[in-house]
Amino acid sequence: MKITLSEPFEKPSLVAMGNFDGFHLGHRKIAERLKQVASQQNLQPILLGFDPHPGLYFRPEKGLHYLTSIEERETLIHELGLEYIVLPFNETLAQMEAGTFVREILWQQLKAEGILLGHDHRFGKGAKGDGKLLEELFSNEKKTVLFVDAYTDSGHPVSSSRIRDLLKNGSLEEANRLLAKPFALEGRVVQGEQRGRLLGFPTANLELHEKLKLIPKWGVYGCRVYLDLEGSNEKKYWSAIANIGMRPTFSGEKISIEAHLLDFSGQLYSKNLRLELLFRLRDEKWFASQSELIAQINLDIAACREQLKVRT
């Protein structure tokens, strides 16, 4: 939940700060340690994040994109029984000295009796806040400071930036392994040009909820689709094949995300859909004719079914 700078928290807490984009294996290590220590000390475990990402605030020209929206992170974090507090990252917060942040945010508002920090986290104006400063301030108040080493895989730290690079380069399954879940795209089904229907493969054209969501390397993917069905509290899912890219055969002018749900019939317009990318089949490519494209789609669907069968 988002809070303003004037809303206090009620119960003494143990806080871990970070962006938690992707909520990957490294973040999960922090969350597990946070829960363990909070339980031992009878404190409320809190993950403290920021929106927008400070990188977007200070370096908008770099065009950072999210692995997960705030809502996705909130769902994942709540599943572990943790409180997720999101501070609006604005001019007030950007100009706040590190010591002031500790006193006014961590102590006064969040009632922090302890803090758990990643290996390289910095905060406050000019990024002057670090572990050394926290140790000094917290120890003076007889509060706890704990550090968590970087979670490594194949000798390299697991980070959101590493996973973004994997997805951009088409290494989906490696990214999914580090995320501990399939990378997902969520949005509303909108009306497209209906080319898929004319070809015999109707598709759901996805308009993303999070406009800054990272789009993985263009191509064709095997997927699982979760769909909100009217009149039901359950989310149903289907296997699917999705194309992400510019649709070069039809001279597309903007990126599209289109999913063909296998063995599904029904109306999808205006429904919310979650597209989990399970594996990558091939790059997007241009076809000289519709008949060539149809033949390739049939091959893709057969390959998708085979991989899904093996994985199941």
Image (spheres, rainbow, N blue to C red):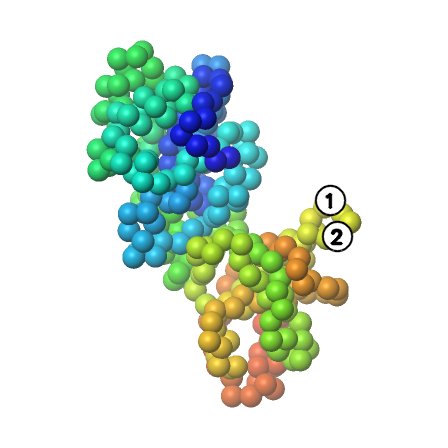
Q: Position of residue 28 (x, y in %)?
A: 45, 36
Disc 1 residue type (three-letter): Asn
Q: Is residue 168 above or below residue 196?
A: above
Of 56 and 239, nearer the camera is 56
The residue most toward the right is 231
The residue tagged with tag 2: helix, strand or loop? Answer: loop
**Residue that badge 2 annotates:** 230
Query: Relative to 191, is 177 on the left or the right?
Result: left
Q: Position of residue 309 (x, y in %)?
A: 64, 59
Instruction: Name the image quarter holding the C terminus.
Output: bottom right
Instruction: Please name the residue shown 23% across and 24% down the image.
Output: 133
- Residue visible at 40% across and 30% down? 5
Quarter location, residue 123? top left
Q: Does any portion of residue 180 appear in the rendered image?
A: no
Depth check: 139 or 40 in front? Answer: 139
Image position, residue 66 (x, y; %): 43, 51
Report whether residue 74 is seen: yes
Q: Residues within 10 Å of mark 2 (few under 14, many from 20)?
A: few
Q: Amino acid at mark 2?
A: Glu
Residue sitting at x 37%, y 45%? 53
Q: Secondary structure at mark 1?
A: loop
- The structure residue drawn at horizontal position 78% and vertical position 49%, both measured from the top left corner, is 231
Distance in Å between CA atoms under marks 2 and 1: 8 Å
Q: In the rendered picture of this protein, how many numbered marks are placed on residues?
A: 2
Q: Which residue is mark 1?
A: 233
